[in-house]
Image (tube, rainbow, N blue to C red):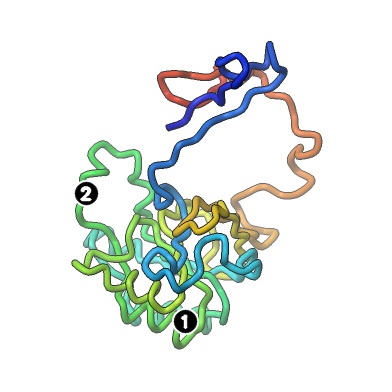
Amino acid sequence: VFAPAINPVSGNPYSYKLEGFEASRYILSCDQMGTHIDAPALWDPEYPAIDELPATFAIRPLVIISIVGKVAKNQAYSLTVADILEWEKVNGNIPEGSVVFVRSDWSQLWSSPGFSKKSRFPGIKLEALKYLHLERKILFHGHEPLSTDMTSNFEGESWLMHNGYAQAEAVANLDKVPEKGALVIIGYSKFQGGSGGLARFIAICPSDWKYGVTIGKTQDSPLPKMNRALKWDFDLGVRVRN
């Protein structure tokens, strides 16, 4: 539930006109929604919660492994060790401590009619997760669907969480990131004891990469004025510019 924050004195929403500012109120039904990080405490209370993840999570080498072609033929295709070895044959070993995102282009279907009713989706084999963590010693992996696999006991996610590994879910725009040579900045909400948190991942790509923005080529301080003001849309439940 998104809504304007209420001034306790007047009982009305804060407004630019009366108070000189506006604020927002958010009620989240779950911390496992949207692009987010699962902390190990999601499955095991003896491992860290979202606020207990170390600061070393902030920036890491980024690897993108694509299974787009195989998912196009089978929407329930799962990443295998063979897929990882195929990537490494071309690109070299996955760097220790890196973040590995599995590209399936599943996120490009999010706004499609009936998408929420799909019961089959791309996944990652448990053997592949073990290879990434035990052999290549990555920090964590991420995927575009809202779950790691379609097994009845969520075997991949269970193994990760019960062994102290985090993961990212509902990651998007992996088609705009190079498969190697980039870094990823990781930011997430830090609610005390949270089993997960809404996250933002920003790729720092080589200077000649075709997507993105570059420091000095966009106005960022001071930020530019917009040509339309923000107004609360009660039907949509957010502020919009119209």
The single residue placed furthest to the top in the displayed view is 17
Q: Label 1: which residue?
A: 88
Give how far across and how far down residue 109 sits, in percent: 33, 45
Left or right, 156 with respect to 36, comes to left
The kind of residue tagged 1 is Glu
Q: Across the whole image, how many numbered discs are drawn on residues?
A: 2
Quarter of the image where one finds residue 241: top right
Q: Label 2: which residue?
A: 118
Residue at 26%, 36% in the rendered image: 113
Q: Residue 192 — which label? A: none
Dot 2 or dot 1, earlier in sequence: 1
Left or right, 119 with respect to 141, comes to left
Q: Assign a secondary structure to mark 2.
A: loop
Q: Assign a secondary structure to mark 1.
A: helix
Q: Residues within 10 Å of mark 1 (few under 14, many from 20)?
A: few
Is 102 situated above or below 9?
Answer: below
The kind of residue tagged 2 is Lys
Residue at 57%, 60% in the rendered image: 51
Q: Nearer the viewer, residue 192 or 92?
A: 192
Give how far across and how far down residue 202 sits, in percent: 60, 55
Q: Residues within 10 Å of mark 2 (few under 14, many from 20)?
A: few
Q: Is there CB contact under 8 Å for labels 2 and 1?
A: no
Is 103 situated above or below 199?
Answer: below
Tell me how far mark 2 sits from mark 1, CA to CA.
32 Å
